[in-house]
Image: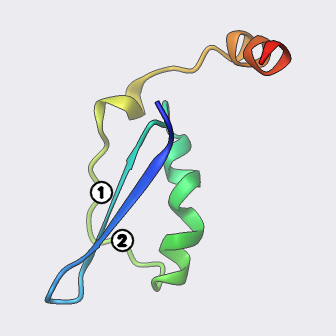
């Protein structure tokens, strides 16, 4: 699955960011700069099931070597 970041700006000015295709807590790093550019304040945060997936670093390294 490709990594996607969906940003929704609501009528009241609040912003929602939804990340898919990223396992583990890497989603936080993916949106860190965007959150900073939007003022850096996070009112609430909900993690998806993907956030709790663990990334097998040895498999990830092998994937990088072979693909």
Residue that lies at the very extreme toward the left in this rendered image: 11
Q: Point out which mark residue 28 bears.
A: none
Q: Position of residue 41 (x, y in %)?
A: 40, 78
- Determine whether 29 is above or below 23 in the image: below
- Determine whether 13 is above or below 43 in the image: below
Q: Which residue is mark 1?
A: 45
Residue at 24% across, 81% down: 14
The Cα atoms of the two marked residues, 1 and 2, are separated by 7 Å
Q: How is the image coloured?
A: rainbow
When asked about the image quadrant of residue 61, the answer is top right
Residue at 58% across, 53% down: 29
Q: Position of residue 34 (x, y in %)?
A: 52, 71
Q: Which residue is mark 2?
A: 42
Q: Regarding mark 1 in the picture, which secondary structure is present there?
A: loop
Residue at 56% across, 54% down: 30
Q: Position of residue 18 (x, y in %)?
A: 33, 54
- Local crowd at mark 2 within 10 Å, few (<14), some, or many (≥20)? few
Q: Position of residue 55 (x, y in %)?
A: 57, 20
Q: Quick check: marks 1 and 2 in contact, CB under 8 Å?
A: yes
In the picture, measured across the screen, residue 12 lies left or right of residue 54, that is: left
In the picture, which quadrant includes the C terminus? top right
When asked about the image quadrant of residue 59, the answer is top right
């Amino acid at each position: 699955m490709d990594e996607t970041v969906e940003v929704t700006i609501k009528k009241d000015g609040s912003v929602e960011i939804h990340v898919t295709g990223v396992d583990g807590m890497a989603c936080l790093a993916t949106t860190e700069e965007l959150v900073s550019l939007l003022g850096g304040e996070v009112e609430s945060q909900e993690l998806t099931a993907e956030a709790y997936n663990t990334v097998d670093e040895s498999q990830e390294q092998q994937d990088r070597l072979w693909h």
